[in-house]
Every structure is written in C-alpha cells, then in structure tokens.
Amino acid sequence: MQQTLKQLEKSQVELMITVTPADYEKDMLAAATRLSERAAIHGFRPGKAPYEIVKQNLGEIKILEEALQSIVEKNYHAAVLAEKIDTIGMPEITIEKMAPGNDFVFKAVAALLPKVKVADLSKITVNKKEVKADDAQVNEVLENLRKMQAKEVVKEGAAAKEDKVVVAMNMTNNKVPVDGGQAPNHQVYLSEPHYIPGFAEQLIGLKKDEVKEFSLKFPDEHYQKHLAGKTMDFHIKVNEVYSIEYPEINDELAQKLGQPSVIALKELLQTNLTKEAENKEAQRQEIEILEKTVLGSEFDIIPDVLINAEKQKMFHELKASLEQQGITMDKYMADIKKTEEEIGNDFSERALMRVKAALVSRQIAKDNDIKVEKEELDKEIEIIKATYQNDPKVLEALERRDVLDTLAATVQNRKVVAFLTEKVVK
C-alpha cells in the first residue's frame, strides 16, 4: 500500500491510497467465501466453493465489489497511522480505480480533529429536578388499561358519543377523489378527537347503512401539505355501530393484567412511571449539561466533512423514524415540498451542535483519562448480540472496525456524561 497526503482547507486532509493486488488478495479470498455462502454454486456446499469456481460463476468484479468495504476500511486506517494524523468521523470515500488484478485506488477526504478548549466546569451548574409519579398519572394509565380491556358489541340504533362507528369513507375535492381519502372500513371512536376536526361529531346519531355527505376543513398545520387548510367533501356510509363496554377497575381487572390486586397494580404503575420520569429527567440533564459545556468551550475551525456526515446521519434517523410510522421518505418530502438537500440544510444548526458535543466529550475523556476498557466493550457487544441474535447483518457488522469504533465512542460518551453529571448537577 502507498499513500499521498494533501492538506485541504477547513482542517481537512486528502489521502490518495493505492493498494496492490497482492495487498488485497486476502480480502478477495474472504469475499469469495462470503459470496459462495449466499449464492448456490452447483456441486459445492455453502462457503466451500474454491475461489476460481466462484470467479467463473459470479465474475471477479462481483468478488471485488464484495471485498470493497474491507479493502477501503483496512487500508484507510493503515494510511492514517502511517501519516500520524489525528482524524475524526467517517471519511468521504471516492473510488478512483477499481479493476480485478490491477491496483485499487481510492481517495479519502478526512476531517482532522479540531482543537478544543473545554469550558471551566466549576462555572457550570445544572439543577436537578425531583420527580415522582402522582396519583393522577397512575389513575390516567389505569383508565387507559381499562379501555384496552373494553368489549365492542354490535349496537342497534343511532350512534352515541361513547360508541365506535365503522364507515366507508370517500373524500373528494371538487368531485375529484383525493389520494388516500378512500377507506372502506374507517374506524372512528366518537369520544376521541379525530385528525379532521368535526368528523366524529358528524357521525353521532347515524345508524347502520345510513349515508351522509358533509364538508370539513383540514387543520392548517396538517402534515399532508396538499390537504392542510383545505375544505374537503365527504361521502360516508355507516357499515356498523358498536357500543363499548368497559370493565370495572377491581381486583379481577388487575388479575387479567398479571397483578394480584388493584393495590399491587397501582404500586407497579407508580414504580414504572417514576422510573420513566427519572429517565426523562436524566435525559434533560444530559442535554443541558452538554449544551452549557459546548457554549462555554472554544473550538478550532470545524471541518465541513464532519458537519455533512452528521447531517447525513440525522437524515437517516429521520428516515428510520418515518418508516416506523409507515411513511416513506419520498412521500414525506413530497408532502413538505422539500428536497433531501433542503432537509439537510435545515439540520445544519443542530448538526453543528451535535458535532461540537462529540468533540467536547472526546476532549474531556482525553483530559481526564476516561477510557473504554476491553471488558466494557465486550459487554456491550454481548448485549447487542443477544438482542439481535437472529439478524446476521448485525452480527456481521460487529466484526467491522468502524462499527466497533462507533460502539466504543458511545460507551465513552456515556462515561463522560456520568463524569460531567457528578461535576455539575446540583
């Protein structure tokens, strides 16, 4: 392997790295083995096909593509060590030359670790708030648990405010069907606020098979921008009306929920709610600690590559959050009428704060000899393995250096927060 180093603006460097075929031969062999485990190669058990057979069946470029990540990671870290530079974050990688049997050439633009002068911790104070779940909170959760045990019974007659109605809904705008506005079995609990104000109220008094037409305005702040603030026409046919029967809050209900009595259930709820409140308070303290420490600290120029990497991370966090709600990123961007770049620009201020917090945490760890011991990292890895034991992608990722570095940084940050908490929380 050979590398050349070039200094860039804003505390960045460029490494041009050349890896000879002999240097990446082992990566190719390992990649061929992985491919043969996933691809059915006639005459060989998974993972047992020789390199030449895998090459004949899948092509050598396919093997090189599979080996790409390990080649880049291993040689990038070797180049950083050889040049004795102190980098931070993930580099921006550009493949310059990639062909089997030839030199593998790639460019890495990396951020140099900016110097940080940490704030005087003796001048920072974060006040601790005492938290405890009160009877009102316990009773609210208990009431929700009671509602979850409710029975829905088909009802003859008109729908009342306490009932549930299932309707066939067709929403139009100037007689044109609205995308997503058709639902053959839309369930509406009439006692609960609907996402379209006034919708539930329109259904009170209707009976099974009755039809009703009406118009309603969507809230101005509705997340679907093409509907926000607009008046839509609704055609509703009632499929069914249900009355809802709620159980009494007594020992029988508690036993259904796994507790011997109502008293025991309330005690459990109070314990759980108190722990939840304590966790939220700890999170609030952590945010305030880091914000005050960052504001009181001094930083060299922050490299753009570091901020851009953080913005990209935030974008992926948003995407994952939306997917959990069943919303695609494309749909979200269309609704808010913004591009990926514009969303990234919206993240700029928060991304800069997150980068500064990471730099402060790293500097505090260095100044106070806060290290992650091998046993601590191993424990963290075992927890992840136990949680994702049926996910081979996660288990495979735990073999990668960058993943382990990120995991070690996470553990170190936790230790730094504990250190700061002891210092500044009163």
Image (cartoon, rainbow, N blue to C red):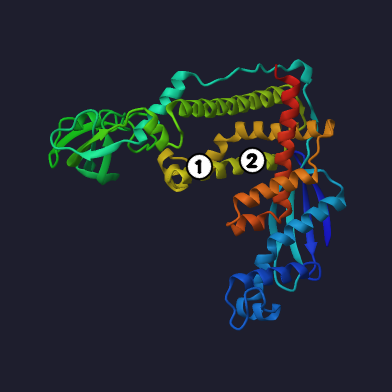
User: Which structural element holds mark 1?
Assistant: helix
Q: Residue at x 36, y 27 (%)?
A: 249
Image side of residue 42 versus residue 114, left or right: left
- Whether residue 302 is visible, yes or no, is no
User: Which structural element holds mark 2?
Assistant: helix
Q: In this orientation, which residue lies closer to the viewer: 111 or 130?
A: 130
| Residue at which label 2 appears | 310
Three-letter residue code for mark 2: Glu
Three-letter residue code for mark 1: Ser
Q: In this orientation, which residue lies closer to the viewer: 145 or 374?
A: 145
- Give the quarter of the figure containing the N terminus: bottom right
Q: Residue at x 82, y 43 (%)?
A: 86
Check whether the beta carbons of the residues at disc 1 and disc 2 lie within 8 A of each other: no
* Image coords of residue 342 (percent x, y): 52, 39
Image side of residue 129 versus residue 9, left or right: left
Say above or below: 226 vs 261.
Answer: below
The picture quadrant where one finds residue 166 is: top left
- Give the quarter of the figure containing the C terminus: top right
Q: Identify the mark at residue 321; answer none if there is no mark.
A: 1
Q: Residue at x 40, y 37 (%)?
A: 256
The picture quadrant where one finds residue 279 is: top right
- Whether residue 238 is visible, yes or no, is yes
* Image coords of residue 67 (percent x, y): 69, 65
* Image coords of residue 295 (percent x, y): 70, 23
Disc 2 crowd, CA 10 A, few/some/many (<14, 14-19, 20+): many
The picture quadrant where one finds residue 18 is: bottom right
Q: Residue at x 42, y 23 (%)?
A: 139
Q: Nearer the viewer, mark 1 or mark 2?
A: 1
Work out how far the residue at label 1 is from the one at label 2, CA to CA, in angstroms: 16 Å
* Image coords of residue 182 (percent x, y): 26, 46
Q: Closer to the N terminus: mark 1 or mark 2?
A: 2
Disc 1 crowd, CA 10 A, few/some/many (<14, 14-19, 20+): some
